[in-house]
Amino acid sequence: MIPTTNDSSFQISTDRTRLDIPMIYRFLSEQSTWAVGISRTVVERSIENSLCFGGYLDGRQIAFARVVTDYATIAYLVDVFVVPEYRGRGYAKQLIRIVMEHPSLQRLRRFTLNTTDAHSLYARFGFAPPQRPDTVMERYFPNIYLS
């Protein structure tokens, strides 16, 4: 368990066995703006192949983040959320701080994420628009889980 500072009852762990997979799946498939319709199989496979962070309040998981990384040069922060009834209490800031301080995620050349509405949250941790957006390309299929 990784201690946090603001709320002693809120703790963050990278222990995959503690993750509440049904809750994560429900949130991503039904409430997220980026993965509506995602299958449980895809959620489970994504968790198996990522560094995951669960946020727990009194033993109940209320937050999640995962990082796709090679642990040497690059990382991609994805699927960050706090369940709606616990938002606005600083848990997302604590979660991102712990992610950014994780020993395996230090000295990476590039750390990326995508967000539509949390720019100010991530800016606190050094994230900014790409310095060279003309070099960034992507293949993007926003509704892939709905087909």
Image (tube, rainbow, N blue to C red):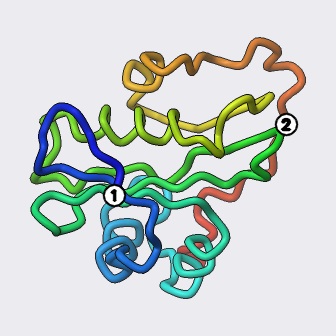
Q: Residue shown at 58%/45% (left/top)?
A: 77
Q: Residue shown at 30%/36% (left/top)?
A: 94
Circle number at residue 137: 2
Left or right position of 98 against 138? left
Which of the 4 image quadrants contains residue 61?
Answer: bottom left
Of the 4 image quadrants, the one containing the C terminus is bottom right
Q: What's the residue type where badge 2 is placed?
A: Met
Left or right position of 113 against 17? right
Label 1 neighbour load within 10 Å: few <14, some 14-19, many 20+: few
Of the 4 image quadrants, the one containing the N terminus is bottom left
Residue at the extreme right of the image, as rendered: 135
Question: Callout 1: helix, strand or loop?
Answer: loop
Question: Callout 2: helix, strand or loop?
Answer: loop
Give the alpha-carbon distance from disc 2 to disc 1, as whole Å. Answer: 37 Å
Residue carrying label 1: 1
Q: Position of residue 121 (x, y in %)?
A: 38, 25
2 or 1: tag closer to the N-terminus: 1
Q: Residue shown at 17%/68% (left/top)?
A: 60
Q: What's the residue type where badge 1 is placed?
A: Met
